Amino acid sequence: KERIMKIIIALCLTLFVAYTLAQTPQKPLWPNFFSATILHHDSRDRHRSYFRWFYDASQNKDRWDGIVHWQGEPYFANLYFDHAAHHEYNVFYQNDYVVCYRLPLNRTIPRPDFNNVHFIGKGLIDEQPVYHWTGRDAARRVNYQVWDRQSNRRDMVRIDVDHEREHRAETFTFHEWDLARQDPSLFNVPAEILRQCTNRLDGELVRF
């Protein structure tokens, strides 16, 4: 009887594990290329910002387009990031005025790693069914939450990041996904603007 009981317990455990694995979706994956509209909120700021993000890891480049506040005034900005060449271009537009700056770039292309996230359930964001994940980067003291769509494409819907060291939090909400390789010309500053670019050695001028 004892042997039969052990077999039954082992069978139950196997069925429980199999059921649990069947209920847990595959972990989200960060795409190699895309463009998307991002709603960004930083706890340091009162306002939220929108920008369009063009991203292509195969080219090691990305670009942000949106409204920024620079020199105390609103400007439309194109921010070009060339991670292979380690520089970025900030181009600001206001009415008929355009100005460009070239700055050093000391970070790699953003590429979130979701290998260590844990599935904690399902939910709705803007009436979209989503999966909910949590994770932590202990070395950087960063906690994060990830929501991706419950569909075959598994588009990213939202990422929340809690920076413990900096006592701040960020939220990135993704809209209007276009999962496609990006045209290389998107990452080139127009030649007539490039000729007027000023080199600067200090850090970032603006952020969204």
Image (cartoon, helix red, strand yellow):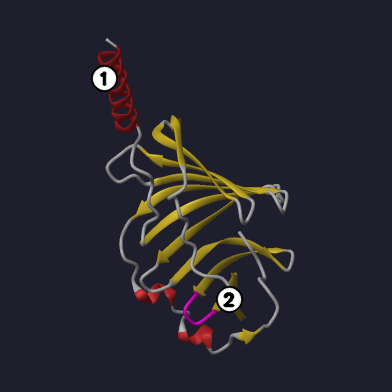
Quadrant containing the N terminus in the rendered view:
top left
Q: Position of residue 55 (x, y in %)?
A: 42, 64
Check disc 1 and report its element: helix, strand or loop: helix
| Marks 2 and 1, the one that precedes in the sequence | 1
Give the image quarter of residue 31: bottom left
Check disc 2 and report its element: helix, strand or loop: loop
Q: Position of residue 33 (x, y in %)?
A: 36, 62
Is residue 80 at all visible to an observer of this figure? Answer: yes
Q: In this view, does 128 lie above or below 173?
A: above
Q: Decide which of 179, 112 is in the foreground and name it.
A: 112
Pointer 1: what residue?
Answer: 7
Pointer 2: what residue?
Answer: 105
Q: What residue type is labelled 2?
A: Leu
Is residue 47 at all visible to an observer of this figure? Answer: no
Q: Position of residue 134 (x, y in %)?
A: 51, 40
Check disc 2: other Cα within 10 Å, few if <14, some if 14-19, many if 20+: some
- Residues shaded magenta: 82-86
Q: Look at the magenta stretch and give its main secondary structure.
A: loop
Q: In this view, does 75 lie above or below 162?
A: below
Q: Position of residue 88 (x, y in %)?
A: 55, 76
Question: Residue 25 got which mark?
Answer: none
Residue at coordinates 34% horizontally, 67% vertically from top-left?
A: 182
Q: Is residue 31 above or below residue 167?
A: below
